């Protein structure tokens, strides 16, 4: 089985070396130095992002944009994340402001974004619509919890990928996974800890394989290939 983790965080220590590809997401400015270290390994397996999560917008001091620009300039293999909106966290106007700034930077550097959206899909889609063609090359909707009926549109219009974890096994999640095209689906742990990711990735893959009526190895390979397409924007295939 080939395992890939589309969304995890910067855990101390090593994680399972058998993971063929993983994307470490920054949550706040304090993560960026570690994210840069991971990117500088340039091992073709571990990728990282710079960004400010909507829970940590208090970190967004006035210097954050130029810092982010410097890091992206120096590291063409880095993406932007974890960015987005969360209705259960304070100060939505400020969240929108910080999200817009990061979206603009990702667009100008042509880097995929890793999106956190909780209860704010209407706002996110409004922002995307207003931007027209000025969008990043791909969007990874991590822990996707939006409307299953919009999945195809989001994939077509915004080159969106949909990432699910082992926790996504209730009826609504099942409807979303079933509506997600096979070439758009990803799995993630979203872990902040140094764990063995394989059991968690396995349960997510099992749910998806059962829904698609395919075997787990085929689905794991498909998921890996999907993540490679996201990464192809920061690691051009020669
Ligand atoms: Zn996360």
Image (tube, rainbow, N blue to C red):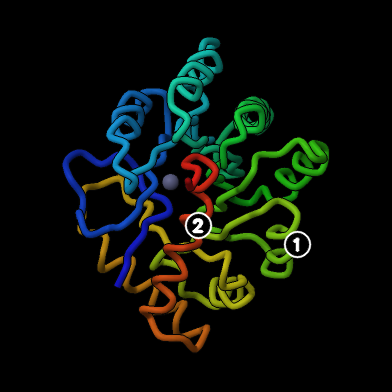
On screen, residue 77 versus residue 19, left or right, reads right
Q: Which mark is residue 7?
A: none
**Residues under numbered marks 2 and 1 in contact, where contact means CB atoms less than 8 Å apart:** no
Numbered disc 1: secondary structure:
helix
Q: Which residue is mark 1?
A: 153
The answer to whether 159 is drawn above or below residue 86 in the figure is below
Residue 84 percent across, percent down from the top left: 59, 40
Residue occupying the point 52% across, 83% down: 212
The answer to whether 53 is drawn above or below residue 199 in the figure is above
Residue 191 vs residue 161, the one in the foreground: 161
Image quadrant where residue 203 sits = bottom left
Residue occupying the point 64% across, 25% down: 101
The answer to whether 60 is drawn above or below residue 218 in the figure is above
Q: Residue furthest top?
A: 63
Dot 1 alpha-carbon crowd within 10 angstroms: few under 14, some 14 to 19, many 20 or more: few
Image quadrant where residue 107 sits = top right
Residue 141 percent across, percent down from the top left: 57, 53
Dot 2 alpha-carbon crowd within 10 angstroms: few under 14, some 14 to 19, many 20 or more: many
Q: Which mark is residue 143?
A: 2
The answer to whether 30 is drawn above or below residue 198 in the figure is above
Residue occupying the point 27% across, 58% down: 19
Q: Residue furthest left?
A: 13
On screen, residue 20 versus residue 80, left or right, reads left
Numbered disc 2: secondary structure:
loop
Earlier-in-chain disc, 2 versus 1: 2
Residue 223 vs residue 233, the one in the foreground: 233
Q: Report, in whole angstroms, how far the alpha carbon at label 2 lies from the one at label 1.
A: 18 Å
On screen, residue 162 versus residue 100, left or right, reads left
Asked whether mark 2 and ligand 1 are closer than 8 Å, the reply comes as yes
């Amino acid at each position: 089985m080939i395992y890939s983790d589309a969304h995890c965080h910067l855990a101390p220590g090593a994680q399972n070396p058998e993971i063929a590809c993983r994307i470490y997401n920054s949550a706040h400015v304090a993560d960026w130095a570690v994210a840069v270290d991971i990117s500088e390994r340039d091992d073709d397996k571990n990728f990282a992002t710079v960004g400010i999560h909507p829970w940590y917008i208090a970190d967004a001091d006035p210097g954050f944009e130029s810092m982010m620009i410097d890091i992206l300039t120096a590291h063409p293999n880095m993406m932007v994340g974890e960015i987005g909106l969360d209705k259960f966290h304070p100060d939505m106007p400020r969240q929108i402001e910080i999200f817009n700034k990061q979206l603009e930077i990702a667009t100008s550097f042509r880097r995929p974004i890793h999106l956190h959206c909780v209860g704010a899909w209407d706002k996110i889609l409004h922002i995307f619509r207003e931007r027209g063609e000025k969008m990043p090359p791909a969007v990874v909707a991590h822990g996707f919890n939006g409307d299953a009926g919009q999945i195809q549109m989001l994939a077509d219009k915004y080159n969106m990928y949909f990432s699910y974890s082992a926790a996504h096994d209730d009826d609504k999640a099942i409807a979303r996974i079933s509506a997600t095209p096979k070439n758009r689906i990803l799995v993630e742990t979203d872990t902040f800890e140094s764990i063995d990711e394989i059991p968690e990735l396995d349960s997510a893959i099992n749910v998806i394989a059962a829904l698609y009526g395919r075997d787990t190895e085929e689905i794991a390979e498909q998921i890996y290939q999907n993540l490679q397409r996201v990464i192809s924007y920061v690691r051009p295939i020669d």
